[in-house]
Image: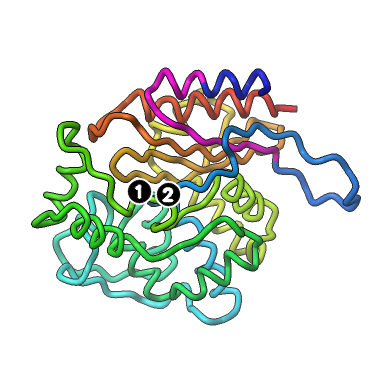
Amino acid sequence: MTGPEKEIRGRFAAAGVRGWLHAVRIEPARIDPAAAPEPEVAVAADDRVVMASVYKLPLLVAFCRAVDEGMLDPVAPVRLLPEARTTGPTGIAAMSDPVTMSLRDVARSMITVSDNAAADALLDAVGLPRVHDTLRALGLQATSVRGGTRDVYDALVRDTRAASLADAMARLADNDRPVDPAAFDPLLSSATTARDMTRLLTAIWTDAAASPGQCGYMRTVLGQQVWPHRLAAGFPRPGVQVAGKTGTLGPLRHEVGVVQYRDEPPVAVAVFTRAARAEIHLPAVDAVIGSAARVAVGTLRV
């Protein structure tokens, strides 16, 4: 175990979480296949973990590839009705009235504020088979997407024997009545590895995931994510750009993204955590995502 990996494991333990991390510099594709692999920082990087809302990142890529192929028009209007939308605390999911917006702005809302209604509307347009095709095309062998947010919510209500989604979420946050639904099992829910997610981010940042225009759109949207309390919290100073996508479900708190210091190569980093406690608000867990990423990125800086 290297020094940085030991330090990261210690930080995870101090925050009361089990953690998984992978970080690697994003370099242009090298011609020599015999060259030494890029330096990396890895903590259980090949263990499969439940994605939660991180599944929205491969969905974004699948959407952009469908645009490239002429299968979807990014400016086509989508009308989202309140009675048919997936619930959630942000974006369209939190609104009271019908909303009409373009597909590409639906995708933007899905990423920037982790909008559940937008994500399920986009998945309906893209189709799950196309997401699977994207995973295979990009070599993400350890990643599987089994459905959208509405599917996870339906399973949570069923598995917790709750009367409603609100009741199911309350049960997830109750330390006195622990539950372990299928949504927390990487064999039964959408899952990935930290290494697969840095591979996907690298593909986006090197224009290998889709056309250069669509990869540029994805980089812009990921850079517009509003949450400052996880990955970005580890890099609060000027001159550092952070782009990413969070995931949250019960004890699961994740973020995958790219960190770039001025005039340095970007670094892809994926951090997944599962907390020992069930409270909805665990600031120490949010913070350790940023601090662990800071250790990893610092190790890889040129």
Q: Is residue 16 shown in magenta? A: yes
Amino acid of disc 2: Val
Image position, residue 179 (x, y; %): 23, 43
Image position, residue 4 (x, y; %): 63, 21
Amino acid of disc 1: Phe
Image position, residue 195 (x, y; %): 61, 45
Tag 2 secondary structure: strand
Q: Whole-Å distance between the Cαs marked 2 and 1?
A: 6 Å
**What's the residue at 16%, 37% (across, down)?**
177
Specify the quadrant of the image occupied by residue 174: top left
**What's the residue at 50%, 37% (across, down)?**
271
Looking at the image, residue 89 sits to the left or right of residue 205; the answer is left
**Colour scheme in use:** rainbow
Looking at the image, residue 155 sits to the left or right of residue 228; the answer is left
Relative to 25, does residue 48 appear above or below in the rendering?
Answer: below
Callout 1: few (<14), some (14-19), or many (20+) C-alpha neighbours within 10 Å?
A: many
Relative to 130, does residue 182 appear above or below in the rendering?
Answer: above
Which residue is nearer to you in this view: 207 or 199?
199
Q: Name the residue under label 2.
A: 50
Q: Name the residue under label 1.
A: 184
Q: Are marks 2 and 1 in contact (CB under 8 Å)?
A: yes
Residue stretch in magenta? 10-25
Callout 2: few (<14), some (14-19), or many (20+) C-alpha neighbours within 10 Å?
A: many
Q: Counting residues from the N terminus, which is met first, the one under dot 2 or under dot 1?
A: 2
